[in-house]
Image (cartoon, grey):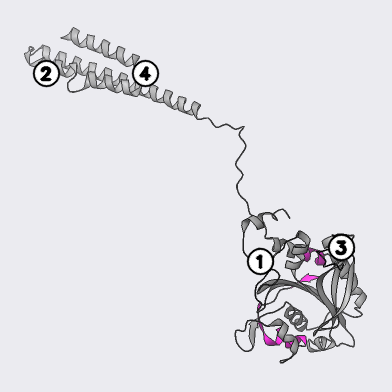
């Protein structure tokens, strides 16, 4: 029986050594150590043995079983390590493959244009100011020489919250607010970008909400030629050094005299084409010398101070600069449109 056990051990260890997969190893375990295995069989026959032999054979059987189990466990680790190694080898990362770029956003075209215009005016000594979008009738109209019942109010119909509180129709109230806030009535040189609201029906060139940038310069001896110089610099820096500007008489209640500024058409260089409606010029913004009444209402003596103001729509600037054909593209958040200008 002793020989039988030792032969079983040799045979089992041989099978363990030959096993090449976890499956084969499991088969060996079942075959030799299982309940129907030969070792269990041997142990069952122990009743026939003498009292002296029993513990000797019992101990040997346990040793043999232990040795086989140890061999199986050892082999199992080896096979597992080899399989892991093989898997790692098969699944190696190819570091030469190009990376997958993480999608990144970019500033909205309008944001870029507003920042570009801000930079340009900051370069000329203007500071950037902001004001509330929900405004009082006083600052939106009256302080700008637009008393109640003034016909020019009709061009700026707004959304009213109460009789006296409304969504601002332009960024001009920031001018009045800034001048009013200057207790020592120092010179003012500022621009104010921001959202404004009008009760317009949306179409390709109109929107009930849009952006404006307003500029104001109040000091002693500010002249029309200063306005022209600043606007000329703006136009050339924004649209190209070869662009000319032209001032045409116009009307705004808060400036006197008032002008519209055009820039020469880039497409036809003044000869006339469809872009400039055959005129050679494209309308860009409105401007003028600050009305003495506006200065007075803000506490500035119009006999001592003078100033100019201008206002433009960044949407229009962006449309002209980048050839955008519909103002609604700025607000409908179509990624195909927005993506084109991430590098702009
Ligand atoms: Zn043209």
Q: Quadrant of ligand 1?
A: bottom right
Spot occupied by residue 184 in the image (x, y as percentages of width and height): 81, 83
Question: Could you tell which of marks 3 and 2 lies nearer the N-terminus?
Answer: 2
User: What distance separates the C-alpha of mark 2 from that of mark 1?
Assistant: 92 Å
The answer to whether marks 3 and 2 mark residues whose Cβ atoms lie closer than 8 Å is: no
Give the magenta-colored segment's residue range.
Answer: 117-146
| Label 3 residue near ligand 1, CB within 8 Å | no
The quadrant where residue 171 appears: bottom right
Left or right: 306 with respect to 214? Answer: right
Q: Is residue 144 magenta?
A: yes
State the mark number for residue 328: 1
Q: Tag 3's secondary structure? A: helix
Q: Residues within 10 Å of mark 3 (few under 14, many from 20)?
A: some
Spot occupied by residue 341 in the image (x, y as percentages of width and height): 70, 56
State the mark number for residue 236: 3
Q: How many marks?
A: 4
Closer-to-camera residue (76/3): 76
**Extreme residue in the top direction:** 3
State the mark number for residue 44: 2
User: What distance separates the C-alpha of mark 4 from that of mark 1?
Assistant: 70 Å
Q: Nearer the viewer, mark 3 or mark 2?
A: 3
The quadrant where residue 97 appears: top right
Question: Could you tell which of marks 4 and 1 lies nearer the N-terminus?
Answer: 4
């Amino acid at each position: 029986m002793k020989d039988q056990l030792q032969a079983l051990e040799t045979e089992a260890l041989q099978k363990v050594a030959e096993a090449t997969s976890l499956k084969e190893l499991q088969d060996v375990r079942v075959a030799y150590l299982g309940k129907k295995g030969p070792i269990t069989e041997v142990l069952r026959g122990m009743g026939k043995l003498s009292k002296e032999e029993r513990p000797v054979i019992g101990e040997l059987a346990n040793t043999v079983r232990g040795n086989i189990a140890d061999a199986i466990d050892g082999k199992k680790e080896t096979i597992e390590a080899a399989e892991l190694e093989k898997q790692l080898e098969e699944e190696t990362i190819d570091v030469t493959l190009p990376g997958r770029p993480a999608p990144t956003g970019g500033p909205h075209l309008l944001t870029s244009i507003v920042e570009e215009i801000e930079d340009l005016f900051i370069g000329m000594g203007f500071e950037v100011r902001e004001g509330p979008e929900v405004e009082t009738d006083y600052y939106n109209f009256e302080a700008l020489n637009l008393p109640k019942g003034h016909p020019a109010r009709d061009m700026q119909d707004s959304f009213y919250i109460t009789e006296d509180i409304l969504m601002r129709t332009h960024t001009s109230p920031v001018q009045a607010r800034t001048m009013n806030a200057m207790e020592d009535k120092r010179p003012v040189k500022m621009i104010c970008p921001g959202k404004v609201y009008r009760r317009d029906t949306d179409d390709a060139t109109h929107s009930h909400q849009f952006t404006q940038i307003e500029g104001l310069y109040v000091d002693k001896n500010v002249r029309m030629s200063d306005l022209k110089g600043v606007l000329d610099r703006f136009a050339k820096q924004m649209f190209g050094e070869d662009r000319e500007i032209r001032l045409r008489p116009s009307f705004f209640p808060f400036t006197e005299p008032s002008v519209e500024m055009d820039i020469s058409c880039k497409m036809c260089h003044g000869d006339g084409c469809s872009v400039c409606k055959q005129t050679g010029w494209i309308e860009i913004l409105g401007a003028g010398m600050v009305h003495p009444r506006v200065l007075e209402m803000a506490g500035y003596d119009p006999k001592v101070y003078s100033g100019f103001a201008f206002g433009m729509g960044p949407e229009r600037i962006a449309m002209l600069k980048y050839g955008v054909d519909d103002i609604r593209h700025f607000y409908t958040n179509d990624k195909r449109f927005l993506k084109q200008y991430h590098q702009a």
